[in-house]
Image (spheres, helix red, strand yellow):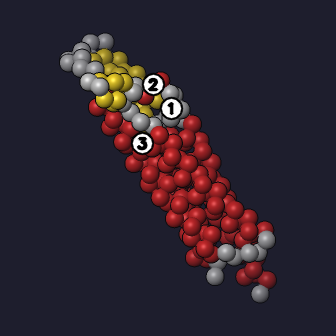
Amino acid sequence: MGKKGNSKSVLGFVFAALILVGLVLVIVGMFVGQVAVTTSSKLAGTSETKMLNLFDGDVWGVEEVLGKKVGVSNVFGIISFIVAVVGAVILAIDCVLNVFLGKNVKIIRFVGIAVTFVGAVLVLVAGLVMASQCGEYLSLDWGSLAEIKYTAGVGVWLGFIGGLVAAVAGGLSLAFNK
């Protein structure tokens, strides 16, 4: 009997640690580069990559063109990261309730898993949309002299992977905690 309870608590700590790792990845992903801008000079044969961060206000280039505001909106990205963080925090609270207090409230875990998973997918979609919009609105045509490429940055991938890690750990803790 003692071994079964002990293995459950060890698994609980492992899943709690994975959820915390996922939460940290999402938070770190929010503050590192969201869009990677690679500038290549064909004449000099050089290439340089710069990251656009989520909270760099004037970098996102919202301008008025023909009476209409155009540019890259990073609000979707900010909201996506907030959703992923809130979901991971819900899962972390559930872990505290489950591991330390012995309370098994499955509805909290279901909500946390769903919100975290949706947040992770939204982070990926937001990053890809931002990269696409940068390519559409912030591109310069240098012809055969230079090339500018916009791709999803490391922050998008950290947020996506962190959200998935937290959601999967929450789901596994649900599966193993009968």
Mark 3: amino acid: Gly
Q: Earlier in the sequence, mark 1 or mark 2?
A: 1
Instruction: Name the residue at the top extreme.
Output: 44
Q: Which secondary structure lies at badge 3? A: helix
- Check disc 3 and report the residue beneath it: 127
Mark 2: amino acid: Val
Asked if labels 3 and 2 touch by Cβ distance under 8 angstroms, the answer is no
Mark 2, residues whose alpha carbon is within 10 Å: few (<14), some, or many (≥20)? few
- Check disc 1 and report the residue beneath it: 53
Alpha carbon distance from label 3 to label 1: 11 Å
Q: Earlier in the sequence, mark 2 or mark 3?
A: 2
Alpha carbon distance from label 2 to label 3: 15 Å
Alpha carbon distance from label 1 to label 2: 9 Å
Name above or below for residue 18 compared with residue 44. Answer: below
Is residue 117 rendered to the left or right of residue 4?
Answer: left
Name above or below for residue 98 compared with residue 128. Answer: below
The x and y percentages for residue 114 are 51, 65
Is residue 154 rendered to the left or right of residue 173?
Answer: left
From this viewpoint, is residue 172 visible?
no
Q: Which secondary structure lies at badge 1? A: loop
Q: Tell me what residue is drawn at x 67 percent, y 60 percent.
A: 92
Q: Give me the disc on residue 59.
A: 2
The x and y percentages for residue 8 are 70, 76
**Which quadrant would residue 5 be assigned to in this image?**
bottom right
Mark 1: amino acid: Asn
Q: Earlier in the sequence, mark 3 or mark 1?
A: 1
**Which quadrant would residue 73 be assigned to in this image?**
top left
Picture quarter with the N terminus:
bottom right
Q: Tell me what residue is drawn at x 31 percent, y 12 percent.
A: 44
